[in-house]
Image: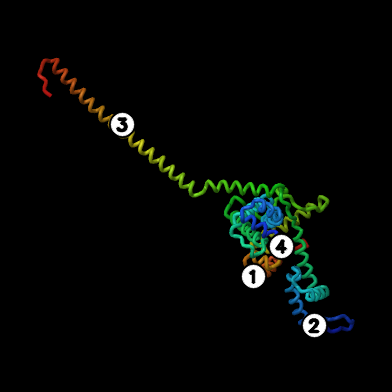
Amino acid sequence: MAATDRNFSGKPVLDEGVNKMNCAKFQNEFDDRLDGRLDPARALEFDAHTAGCPACWPAWQAYRGMWEVVSRQPSVVPSFGFAQRTLRRLHEQAERRFWQLPVFRWATAMSLLIIVGVTGVIVCRQAETSRRVATYAAVQHDRLEDFDVIVSLDSLGGETQL
Amino acid sequence: MTPDNEIDVALMLRVKAGDEEALRELIERHQRAVIGVIYRAIGDAWEAEDIAQRVFIQVFRSARRYKPTAKFTTWLYTITHNAIRNEYRRRSRHAAESFEALTQPSETGEPGAQLADSRVMDPSQQVVERELQAKIQTAIQLLPEAQRTAVILCRFEGLPYEEIAEVLDCTVSAVKSLLHRARETLKEKLYGCY
C-alpha cells in the first residue's frame, strides 16, 4: 500500500488524506457491492479494504445489515383458486361490457325517446277530447236552456219568437 | 432469450389469439410474484389479490398490443407498477381510508393470501419478529413511489437495474440513484433493527 507508513510498533499507519479519498471511493460502491455489480477483482479489493478499515467497516456493516433486515419482510402465497377466480372475473366483466356497448346505449336512449313521444301524443289527444266534450256539453246545455224558455212561453199562450 | 421468457412469450402469443387456457397458465406462473410485489407495496393481502386480478385482466386486454420485443416479466411488472400507482392515487382521493390504513399493516393477520413464513419461533420471538416486519413494511410503504418499486423489484424479485429501468421508464443511473436514496432512508428508519 503506497499510502502506508510504519510506526514504532510495526503496525501499518494509513496516510489520512489518501485514506479518506480511498474510503469515499469504496463507500460509493456500497450499492454496487450489495447488488453484485462489481467485477470480481474489484469486489475482492472492496472486501479487503472494508474488512481492514475502521471507518468503512461499521458503515458497510450497517448498510449491509439494513438490506438483510429488509428481506425479512414475509412474502404471501396466493389463496387457493386465484387463477380460476381471475378468469371468472374476466368473464363477468366481459359480459357487463357487452351490455355497455354503444349499440345498447343508443337503443336504450331511442326507446326512452319513443316512450316519451307516444305518452305525449296520448296525453295531448286525451286533453283535446276532454276539451271537445266540454264544448259539446256547454252547447247542449245552452240549447236545453233555450228549449225551456220556448216551452214556458208556449205554456203562457204567447207567440214564440226566437 | 431465457427459456422461461420463451415459455412466457409463447403463452402470451396464445393469449393474444384469445386462448384462455394460456392465460390461466400465465397466471399460475406469475401469480406469486405479482401478488408479492403488490403486497409489499400496499401491505394488505386481500387488496393485493384484488389488484393482482386486475393486473392479469389488463394483461388479457392488452394482449392484442403485446409485442415480444421486451422480456415478458418486464411488461408484466410495468402493468403491476401502474396498478399499484393507481391504487395509491385512488386511496389518496378517498378520505374515508385514512393514511394509517394505507401505511399500517394489519395486526390481526391476513385472511386472504397466506403469509409465507415457515420459521418456527416461540411466542415472544414471534411478537418481536412481527413488530420488526411491520416496521419494515411501513418503512417501505412510506418511500416515494419510484424508490419503493425499485427496492421491491431489486430486493425481492432480484431484477437487474436494466429491467427496473424499463419498468420505471428511466435510465439505469436513475435506478442506481433511486436505490441509493431508498437505502439511506431505510437505514435511518430501521436504525436499531440491524
Compare marks 2 and 3 and give the one earlier in the sequence: 2
Mark 1: which amino acid? Thr
Q: Nearer the viewer, residue B149 or B79?
A: B79
Discs 4 and 3 lie in a common subunit: no
Q: Is residue A144 visible?
A: yes
Discs 2 and 1 lie in a common subunit: no
Occupied quadrant, residue B131: bottom right
Q: Residues within 10 Å of mark 3 (few under 14, many from 20)?
A: few
Tag 1 residue: B171
**Is there CB contact under 8 Å for labels 2 and 1?**
no
Q: Nearer the viewer, residue A123 or A157?
A: A123
Q: Residues within 10 Å of mark 2 (few under 14, many from 20)?
A: few
Tag 3 residue: A130
* Left or right: A118 as drawn, with respect to B117: left
Q: Secondary structure at mark 3?
A: helix
Chain for disc number 4: B
Q: Give the Cα separation between the discs numbered 3 and 1.
A: 81 Å
Q: Secondary structure at mark 4?
A: helix
Q: Is residue A123 above or below residue B97?
A: above
In the picture as drawn, the residue positioned furthest to the left comes out as A159
Q: Which residue is found at the position 67% from the left and 47% from the top?
A: A84
Mark 2: which amino acid? Asp
Q: Secondary structure at mark 1?
A: loop
Tag 2 residue: A15
